[in-house]
Amino acid sequence: MIPTPRQYHRPGQPPVLLLALLCTVGAGARAEVPIQRSFLRLPSSNGHGAVMLDVEQRKVTHFREHLFATEEPVIDAAGNDVLENGQPKVIHARDLLFDAFFGLRSGGTQRWLSTQEADRDASGYAAWAPEKTGGTGLGALVQRVGTLEATTFVFAPQGLPHASFVMALRVRNTGTSAVTGLSAFSLHNFHLGFGRPGVMADLDENGETVELSGNDFVEKGFAGVLVARPLGTVARKSAWLSTTTGSQNAYSVVNGGGGQDLQDFTAQPSAGTGWVTAYQFNLGDIPAGAERWVGVAFAHHGDPAAGATVRQWLTEYAGASGAQALVDAEVARWAAFQTDTVKVPAGMSADEESLLRHSAVVLHMAQVRSRDVYLREFLSRDGEPRRTRFKAPGGTPASLPAWFATRATARCWRACRRGSGRTPGFGTGPTRWRPWPRWACRAMPATRCPTTSTRTVAASSTGVSWSRIRCRRTSSPSRATTASAWRRRTSTRRGRTSSSTASVSSCGRCGTTSGRRATPRWWTRPGPRCPRRWGTRWWRSSTR
């Protein structure tokens, strides 16, 4: 309601009616700020590698050999960390891809889709179900060429547990008449040369070799081997060096328009700088409302001689499946994740649900699932030694440093955080025995009770025995019964007695000695629980 103004007003003050009118006009004339898309890079990961689709550049711009950005610190010949500007230098994981994208021939001319505008509103992550938004790890780039809708799907397949990605193209005729004479092209420019330049930086492309194995392109270099497998019937297979010109350069052929086909690659494998590969797929005619699919699957291994292994990975993953089948299978995997794993609280709006579901997808993709990694004897180029703290194949899974093995706080913290096996006894009732990490047990010497077969683990030089399984005779975990061990342990902690002081522990029920140092009663006495829920008073007190 607009107030009625007074007949008179003080000098220098505007009338109340004028202020009310100005406020009313301002509220009605205020324009809403248009929403602008600010997130144009769509990453995808399967926990082993990562790939990125750039909607702004309209192509795939990154393919990382690992999900993590760095492998380990740089160390010198003495085993010490190398510092640079006061900070430890690190070994960066490599970005193996310069770019990859599709091309399309229609209406008597051809072009690379990286030169066509993208429908940013239609692009984004593919929906996990009809009428849903996002919720999958499949990036989708939507472009239009006449009545044709070209959608590029890029994803790291969850069903292929290696550094890999799939690039699929769906061409749909949205017009009312058939489109004839269609062909699709795929271009893939990987860099497998020297270097460890860092995150989002390209490797060198020196010393690369390309060969054909059936329809698979096998590209090798210092950074390993990468296999490209077409998903669909291939018409032409082309490869060329970046310095090549004329009709042998497939990029120039498609970029120049017209209807010229690519030239097949028939040369013998030879090392060169800047190899690029491409496929041509002839789609034929597409009736109104119909669609065609093509695609390429890629996988990488750090060993340049592991081409056969990588090809086997792709065979096990793709088999005889086409691009559409692999995309549908990937969407189905994410749909199962959304229905079986993600629990949506009641009362959420549609936008809130979409945000929650896709946040869960991002968290899922961010989990590193690599169990091992291949390391070459050279770091970033031939002749540069690779020094590492990683164990060789068949070595000890984890070797704990001395300070870790001799601190009860660290041992209990690991027992609290990790888990499998059993922990030292504390507390009462069914919650008395908690999981103990197997890798920590394997890193320590072990023995068994000679009568009851109770297996104990001696922690470093202190000889503290942790019971891992229950006594077969009494069904009770082994516990120390001697008080002298507590006195010796206390003296050791205070520095008055050597840690080599011997004692004998016995099974808490049967009394059989195990030949190991006894566990002090003070350590196994029940007490208040720690903030992490599993520890007891001895866990806290051991930090004194």
Image (cartoon, helix red, strand yellow):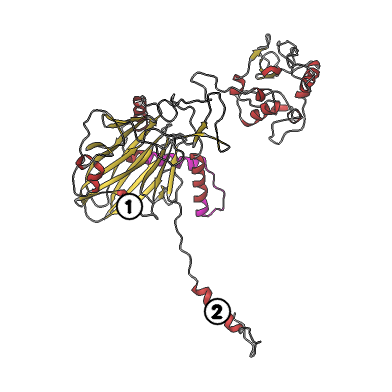
Q: Main secondary structure of the magenta part?
A: helix
* Front-lying residue, 133 or 490: 490
Quarter of image, res 526? top right
Percent x, y of residue 158: 43, 36
How packed is label 2: few (under 14 Cα within 10 Å), some, or many (20 or more)? few
Q: Amino acid at mark 2?
A: Leu
Residues in magenta? 327-353
Q: Would you name the residue on which mark 1 appears?
A: 143
In the image, farthest residue toward the top: 450
Query: Does residue 127 show up magenta in the picture?
Result: no
Residue drawn at x 54%, y 44% is 343
Looking at the rendered structure, the number of numbered marks drawn on it comes to: 2
Percent x, y of residue 226: 35, 32
Residue drawn at x 47%, y 26% is 386
Query: Does residue 332 show up magenta in the picture?
Result: yes
Quarter of image, res 529? top right
Percent x, y of residue 318: 34, 33
Q: Is residue 184 above or below residue 119?
A: above
Quadrant the C terminus occupies: top right
Mark number, residue 22: 2
Question: Cα distance, mark 1 to mark 2?
Answer: 46 Å
* Front-lying residue, 387 or 57: 387
Left or right placement of residue 58 versus residue 455 in this view: left
Q: Amino acid at mark 1?
A: Gln
